[in-house]
Amino acid sequence: ADGSLTALIDISQFGGTITVDGALNSVGDYTIFGGALQGGGTVTAPFVTNVMGAISPGTVGGIDTLTID
């Protein structure tokens, strides 16, 4: 929950699962072409675009608050 990752470029997710329970910060855009974004943390990016992926607050079997800023 105390973890933080900062990307200095765009983030493009084509598959797999990214679980954010701390903070994911990007100075570029975050585009989900496939896979899943889940967790209970905060994603900060200029634009978050979901094309064919899934956005799920919490994890499997749990409910949480996923903040997209």
Image: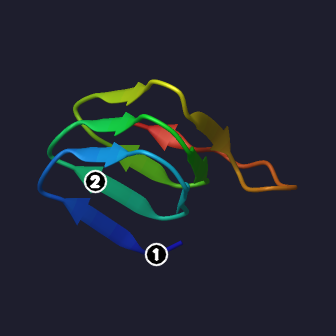
Q: How crowded is mark 1: few (under 14 residues within 10 Å), some or many (20 or more)?
A: few
- Please identify, in this view, whether the residue under mark 2 or under mark 1 is nearer the observer: 2
- The image quarter containing residue 28 is top left
The residue type indicated by label 2 comes to Asn
Q: Earlier in the sequence, mark 2 or mark 1?
A: 1
Tell me if label 2 and label 1 are in contact, CB under 8 Å.
Answer: no
Q: Which residue is drawn at 47% across and 64% down?
A: 22
The residue type indicated by label 1 comes to Asp
* Above or below: residue 20 compared with residue 11: below
* Above or below: residue 68 compared with residue 60: above
Which quarter of the image is occupied by the C terminus? top left
Taking depth in this image into account, of 52 and 38 the one nearest to the observer is 52
Horizontal and vertical percent position of residue 27: 15, 46
Looking at this view, name the residue that lies furthest to the bottom: 2
Q: Is mark 2 on a helix, strand or loop?
A: strand
**What label sits on residue 2 in the rendered view?**
1
- The image quarter containing residue 47 is top left
Horizontal and vertical percent position of residue 38: 60, 50
Q: Is residue 1 left or right of residue 30?
A: right
Q: How crowded is mark 2: few (under 14 residues within 10 Å), some or many (20 or more)?
A: some
Q: Which residue is drawn at 54% across and 72% down?
A: 1
Looking at this view, name the residue that lies furthest to the right: 61
Q: Which residue is drawn at 34% across and 35% down?
A: 31
Q: Which residue is drawn at 87% across and 55% down?
A: 61
Q: How far apart are marks 2 and 1 (CA)?
A: 13 Å
Q: Badge 2 is on which residue?
A: 25
- The image quarter containing residue 6 is bottom left
